[in-house]
Structure formats: structure tokens, C-alpha cells
Image (spheres, rainbow, N blue to C red):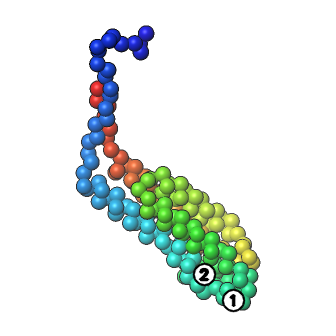
Amino acid sequence: MSDQRLIGEPAVVPQTAVYGDSPGRHAIEIVLRVIGVIAGAVPLVVGLIAVAKVNWSANGFSAPPVRVWGMVLSPWVAVATAIAGLILLAAAATPFRGDKLVAGVLSAAGGFAILVATPTVDHVILGHRYGTMFLVVGIVQIVIGLLMGFVWSRDRVAVA
């Protein structure tokens, strides 16, 4: 009976009023996204430098490891680092906070796992610098995602 109405009675449709949409919020969002892009570019640059240093003509993916910024990277790890950096960069560039949070959590978890376990890939031990890089980039992405949710969220009020 509650969903019946009298003929001629106007239906009340709730509308959403949006408050607080200011240019300052747009500027803060852009600054946060730029910081995220810079952080995401670090593993991308490391990976691309390592890919460029690998002697691909000799043995391809079986080539000897290369050293970039104090990190020793095998060809497989160099390519994986560049791909991970590209994903982090893309997540940072989007206006959605969920992308930053997911990519940040995955990066931080991977970096933490590398720090704790120090795994060996292709007879190359992934050192603390490599794990720290992904841990720090992941934390930066998480913080930016949380700040965007706090700063950029709009106040919505249902108006009848």
C-alpha cells in the first residue's frame, strides 16, 4: 500500500544537491595525481634503463644481469619492473582513487615481500633497494588514494 499514490498527486523525486565543488579542489587533485605519476615513474624509469642496458643480442632473456641505481636486475626482472611501473603510472594518472589504492596495495605488498624474503630470480638476489622502491611507491599511491577520497569527495545531500 505504501507504493500507491492518489491520481493527480505529484510524485516526490529526491534530487542530489552537490556542495563544495571549488577550483581549489581541482588543483589539489591535480597536484596529488602529479605526485603519484612521479612516484609511479620511478620503477618505470628503472625498468627501462635496465632493459636498455641488457645485451639482448647475446642471449636474450638469458643475458647477464645489469646494475641500475645500485640494484642488480636480470632481463626478466627488468621487463617486469618496467611493466609494473607502467601500471603504477597509469593508475596514478586516472582520476579514480580506487585505481591508486589497488595498485598501491599491490606494490607495497610486493615490496614488503621482497624486503622480507629477498627472493632469487634468475640467480640474482632481489636486494633491499628493489623492495624498498616498490614499498615506498606503493605507500605513496595509497596515501594519495586516501587523500583524494578525503579532499576530493563531494558533500551530497538528498533534497526532496
Pinpoint residue 54: horizontal percent, then vertical percent.
Answer: 64, 85
Residue for badge 1: 57
Q: Is residue 90 visible?
A: yes
Q: Compared with residue 50, is residue 95 higher up or lower down, i.e. above or below?
A: above
**Residue at the image point whose x is 49% and y is 64% from the top:** 90
Q: Which residue is mark 2?
A: 51
| Residue 30 left/right relative to 24 | right
Q: Do callouts 1 and 2 mark residues in contact (Cβ within 8 Å)?
A: no
Q: Residue at x 62, y 74 (%)?
A: 79
Seen at 33% across and 10% down, the residue is 6
| Amino acid type at image mark 1 | Ser
- Looking at the rendered image, the quarter that the C terminus falls into is top left
Q: Is residue 128 visible?
A: no
Question: Is 50 positioned to the left or the right of 119 in the image?
Answer: left
Tell me the kind of residue under disc 2. Val
User: Which of the two labelled residues, at mark 1 and mark 2, occupies the earlier sequence position?
Assistant: 2
Element marked by disc 1: helix
Viewer-nearest residue: 42 or 160: 160
Cα separation, mark 1 vs mark 2, equals 12 Å
